[in-house]
Amino acid sequence: MEIIPVIDLMNGRAVHAVRGRRENYRPLQSPLCPSAEPRAVLEGLLGLHAFKTVYLADLDALMGKPRQTAVVSGLLRAFPGVCFWIDAGLPEPGWAWPEGRGVVVIGSESLGVEISALPDARTTPFILSLDFQGGGLLGPSALPDRPDLWPERVILMSLARVGSGAGPDRARLGQFIRNHPGHRFVAAGGVRDARDLAALEVLGVSQVLMASALHSGAVDGAVLGRFG
């Protein structure tokens, strides 16, 4: 099971995400890095562990503002050995990051109510994020019941648990893993410590997105070394 650190970007800086309430996000303060400058944050994370993959969330784009293209492109250039998953809203047909790198993540919240806005997973490479807030899905309500439209890899994002210390939504994760064995599921939101990670690995989770537990030290280099 791979651990993937998350960097949430807002107004050119890394911010601390809590429960999906973006209007309340503040610049990240972490013992891993001297500032909230995105490059410093990523350097701090890579100093903690040799992460192969990093998740970038362009919150400006997700809130309807222009993409932070210069910030993201700068990270792609500065860290050529890292695979970046990038959620920056619904891309236009044929659009790609200037470096030709970066795996596109499409969150259900970016689709509005139209399930037809989702690209064809057979011809367009992307990762789908099913974004849950509380008990409901943000986006097309039918999408969780249309696995024929999903790509192989699907993130189960529990926004209300992000940065909350509430623990991951193991019930939902387990249900999706059991019902859709042909897909690889990524847990996101609420992971607190090594016990949560061990439980998710047993559950069959493919990868885990996390941030708060890394910056707080609850998940340190020794813990990370136990996982892929």
Image: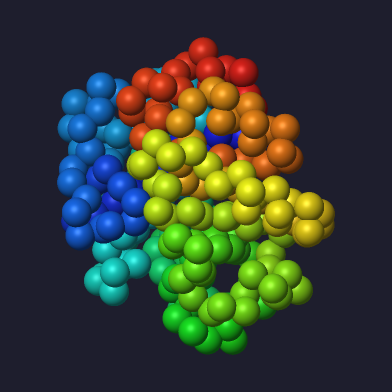
Residue found at the far right of this picture: 181
Q: Is residue 42 above or below residue 107?
A: above
Residue found at the far top of this picture: 222
Q: Is residue 206 above or below residue 224?
A: below
Q: How is the image coloured?
A: rainbow
Number of numbered discs visible in the structure rendering? 0
Q: Looking at the image, which residue is at 25% across and 22% down?
A: 31
Q: Looking at the image, which residue is at 56% across and 78% down?
A: 141
Residue 41 shows in this picture? yes
Q: Is residue 220 above or below residue 167?
A: above
- Quarter of the N terminus within the rendering: top right
Residue 101 point in image, percent of width and height: 51, 54
Q: Looking at the image, which residue is at 36% across and 42% down?
A: 163
In the drawing, does residue 72 fall left or right of residue 166?
left
In the drawing, does residue 108 fall left or right of residue 206?
left
In the drawing, does residue 120 fall left or right of residue 52?
right
Residue 109 point in image, percent of width and height: 45, 71
Residue 191 point in image, percent of width and height: 48, 36
Residue 52 shows in this picture? no
Q: Looking at the image, which residue is at 47% across and 16% down?
A: 221
191 and 69: which is toward the camera: 191
Residue 129 point in image, percent of width and height: 54, 61
133 and 85: which is toward the camera: 133
- Quarter of the C terminus within the rendering: top right
